Amino acid sequence: MGRALLVLANETFRRKAIDWIMRAPVDTRVEFKGPKRTTPQNDRMWAMLTELSLQLAWHGQQLTPEDWKLVMLDALRREKHDQLRLVPNTDGTGFVPLGTSSSDLSKEEMTDLIEIIFAFGARHHVIWSEPKAKAAA
């Protein structure tokens, strides 16, 4: 078996997962992840990152929403005590951080990320355009 993904959305998929596990060769790897982040959570994250980019300079630099996403994902990793991983870049002039993509976050992880963004923004006097920015979908 190569790679496969099942979402345990109903009993049929649960039975299929059990069948695959029973037929899988020894040393097959199985990974369980919580439910994937929701579209409203994703929309909220990008709205909040945009607010940061419009209202804050970070160490003298205006960051894009994408830049802020990387900064906030790093904060999430640190809060979860995940190991920070850096590798040299291709020309040897700096480093590239390796880490989680926001598209791979679970609902719970996305909620945590939104809370981190909200708390960071509050500490830096960001005015959220959406009053419920703290509430994760």
Image: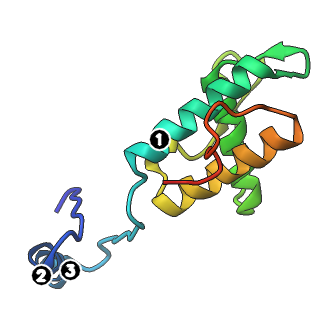
- From the image, state whether disc 3 or disc 2 is nearer to you: 2
**Residue beneath disc 1:** 42
- From the image, state whether disc 3 or disc 1 is nearer to you: 1
Q: Are marks 2 and 1 in contact (CB under 8 Å)?
A: no
Type of amino acid at the residue the image marks with label 1:
Asn
Q: How far apart are labels 3 and 1 at the CA level?
A: 32 Å
Q: Callout 1: few (<14), some (14-19), or many (20+) C-alpha neighbours within 10 Å?
A: many
- From the image, state whether disc 2 or disc 1 is nearer to you: 1
Q: Which mark is residue 15?
A: 2
Q: Callout 2: few (<14), some (14-19), or many (20+) C-alpha neighbours within 10 Å?
A: few
Whether 74 is drawn above or below 1: the answer is above
Task: Identify the residue shown where x is 43% and y is 44%.
Answer: 40
Q: Position of residue 6 (x, y in %)?
A: 21, 64
Residue 117 at least partly seen: yes
Task: Identify the residue shown where x is 78% and y is 48%.
Answer: 119
Whether 79 is drawn above or below 43: the answer is below
Mark positioned earlier in the residue sequence (3 or 2): 2
Q: Nearer the viewer, residue 59 or 126?
A: 126
Left or right position of 124 against 51: right
Q: Callout 3: few (<14), some (14-19), or many (20+) C-alpha neighbours within 10 Å?
A: some
Type of amino acid at the residue the image marks with label 2:
Arg
Residue most toward the front? 131
Mark positioned earlier in the residue sequence (3 or 1): 3
Q: Nearer the viewer, residue 71 or 98?
A: 71
Q: Which mark is residue 134?
A: none
Task: Identify the residue shown where x is 63% and y is 50%.
Answer: 113
User: Which element is circle 1 on?
Assistant: helix
Task: Identify the residue shown where x is 52% and y is 42%.
Answer: 101
Q: Nearer the viewer, residue 21 or 53?
A: 53
Q: Which mark is residue 21?
A: 3
